[in-house]
Image (spheres, rainbow, N blue to C red):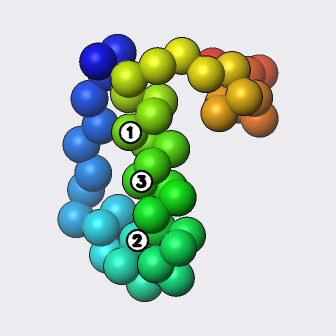
Amino acid sequence: MLFETVLLEEAFKFLSELNRKHSEKILYNIRKAETETDPELLKKLTDEI
C-alpha cells in the first residue's frame, strides 16, 4: 500500500448522493491509487502534485 485514504463523513454523504455507478468508480479509483502508481489515473493532476 502506497498510502491510506481516510474519508470524512461529508465525503461518505457526497458519495451516497451520487449515482451508484459513479460512486463505485470513485471508490475504485481511490483504492487503485492506494495500491499502485498509475500515471493515467492522476494525469489531470500532474501539474498540481
Instruction: Give the vertical position of 1 relative to 24 (above or below).
Output: above
Instruction: Give the amino acid at mark 3.
Output: Leu
In the picture, residue 12 is in which quadrant? bottom left
Q: Could you tell me which residue is drawn at 38 percent across and 23 percent down?
A: 35
Q: Mark 1: which secondary structure? A: helix
Q: Could you tell me which residue is drawn at 50 percent across and 44 percent down?
A: 29
Q: Mark 3: which secondary structure? A: helix
Q: Earlier in the sequence, mark 2 or mark 3?
A: 2
Residue 14: in sight, yes or no? no
Q: Are marks 2 and 1 in contact (CB under 8 Å)?
A: no
The x, y position of residue 34, in whole percent, is: 38, 28
Q: Are marks 2 and 3 in contact (CB under 8 Å)?
A: yes
Instruction: Give the vertical position of 17 relative to 42 (above or below).
Output: below
In the picture, residue 9 is in which quadrant? bottom left
Q: Nearer the viewer, mark 2 or mark 1?
A: 1
Instruction: Give the amino acid at mark 2.
Output: Leu
Q: Are marks 1 and 3 in contact (CB under 8 Å)?
A: yes
Instruction: Give the vertical position of 44 relative to 18 (above or below).
Output: above
Q: Mark 2: which secondary structure? A: helix
- Residue under pointer 1: 31
Marking on residue 15: 2
Left or right of 12: which side holds 30?
Answer: right
Instruction: Give the amino acid at mark 1.
Output: Arg
Q: Could you tell me which residue is drawn at 69 percent across and 20 percent down?
A: 39
